Image (cartoon, rainbow, N blue to C red):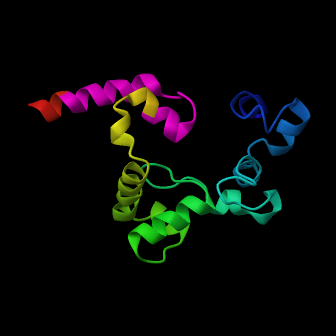
Amino acid sequence: SWLGLSKTFRKYFPDPLTAKKYERKPELIANRVYANRLGNGDEKSGDGWKYRGRGLIQITGKDNYAAFRKWLGRDIEPEDVAGNLDLSVKTAVWYWKCYELAELNSVEKVTRRINGGLNGIDERCKLYRALMVTDND
């Protein structure tokens, strides 16, 4: 909804009129929100949609996809990640190693590094605690 856009992406949809133009148009939303960031071109380039989040870690942006390709050692298209479990998992492994997330030793710090905010932090903490119990058994 336009209200959701205004709350989640206030910087990009600062008023109801702007938000309503993009309401329920995911391709247009991605192109606006990810324009001129992460190696993407401007809004009209379509890079925001092409390089939107995919994989278990939701890698996003032209630069991140290029770095993942280099690490992987082969050429892939962003849409290949969404339809391939092996590639999807490898995006998370790459991101985890590349950004040394294990060194942060904090669910909150890792979440901030990946998301920029703390959306879903309670569920992440719960899953992390469950994993640690399983890992220590």
Quarter assignment of residue 16: top right
Residue shown at 50%/64% (left/top)? 67
Q: Position of residue 39 (x, y in %)?
A: 67, 60
Residue furthest right as drawn? 17
Classified by dominant secondary structure, the portion drawn in magenta counts as helix
Residue furthest left as drawn? 137
Q: Is residue 106 left or right of residue 42?
A: left
Relative depth, front residue between 114 and 15: 114
Q: Quadrant of the C terminus?
A: top left
Q: Tell me: residue 37, above or below residue 70.
A: above
Magenta span: 110-132
Q: Is residue 113 left or right of residue 137?
A: right
Q: Position of residue 25 (x, y in %)?
A: 75, 49
Q: Tell me: residue 129, above or below residue 1.
A: above
Residue shown at 46%/63% (left/top)? 81
Q: Quadrant of the N terminus?
A: top right
Residue shown at 16%/32% (left/top)? 134
